[in-house]
Image (spheres, grey):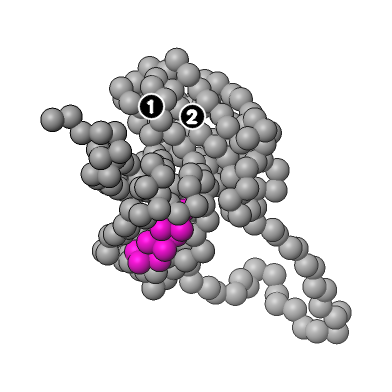
Amino acid sequence: MLRTHKHAFAHMQSAISIFLFIPICFAESISGRVYDPAGRLVAGARVMLMQDYVKLKETKSDDLGEFVFSGLQEGMYQVQIKQPRFSLFQQSVQLGNQPMRIYAVLPLARETEAVEIDAPTTLSREKPGEPIGHSVTLGGQVEPAELIQPIRPAYPRGASTRGAQGSVVLYATIQTDGTVSDPVVLEPVDPDLEREALRSAGTLRYRPMRLNGAPVACQVTIVLDFKLQ
């Protein structure tokens, strides 16, 4: 016996797929959006597509922060984004038979303050050729953050009833204790889905990133794909 549309919809199951760090869209292309750390769209940013760090193409983000490079062959690419008062954004992309989408959050540029202090002429000075000894400590050892408690969101009943689905993209900070803080919604879909994504992000736990053995804060992009089945 055939079910009515209403009866079938009442038995529709909800499923959630979670992808960390690797969002995907549009075949044979690399596309994306540019944001500032507050989650606002950045227009007019200079976006460069490179291969082996040789520039192939260049464009600018449009009024909605969007950019796209189409007609690409499979291979490894680098995407660099520049904008005044922000630090360089760079991401490597392995393009196969699936399209790739980048959510580029530009970090604020580090300010440098130079102050010159003159010593009074009456103070004694070190003799030339007598350097003050100091030790040099090498660094550069980075251990990436590791997820130890995965996210376990629920499909909101209201969103399921309305047939709402889609990907909610979050940008957040992994603190030195492994907790996730300050999540910002980059890609809005539905209010109920966004609230559940933000709530669930707070339940994530990581082994924090370590720089030269010491824990440091780092940023993470989280994509939660809400699908009705």
Q: Is residue 5 visible?
A: yes
Is residue 88 shown above or below 5? Answer: below
Give the residue at the far left of this rendering: 1
Q: Is residue 49 above or below residue 212?
A: above
Depth order, front residue of 109/105:
105
- Give the structural element (helix, strand or loop) at label 2: strand
Amino acid residing under circle 1 = Pro
Question: Which image quarter is the C terminus in?
Answer: top left
Q: Which mark is residue 99?
A: 1
Are discs 1 and 2 less than 8 Å apart at CB? yes
x then y, percent, for residue 227 = 32, 41
Does 21 appear above or below 66?
below
Whether residue 141 is visible here, answered yes or no, is: no
Query: What residue would you read off at disc 2?
Result: 31
Q: Residue at x 61, y 71 (%)?
A: 131
Q: Badge 1, how many Cα within 10 Å: few under 14, some, many 20+?
A: some
Residue 199 within the magenta-colored segment of the rendering = yes
Rendered image quadrant of residue 167: top left
Above or below residue 16? Residue 210 is below
Q: Which mark is residue 112?
A: none
Q: Residue at 29% across / 33% down in the picture?
A: 5
Q: Which residues are magenta?
A: 194-204
Magenta stretch contains residue 42: no
How far apart are the two marked residues, 1 and 2, measured between alpha carbons? 8 Å
> What residue is rendered at 48% in x and 19% in y?
70
Q: Secondary structure at mark 1?
A: loop
The image quarter containing residue 179 is bottom left
Q: Measuring from the top left, give residue 122's x and y in whole percent.
A: 85, 84
The rendered magenta stretch, by its main secondary structure, is classed as helix
Image quadrant holding the N terminus, namely: top left
Of residues 228 and 66, the one drawn nearer to the viewer in this rendering: 228
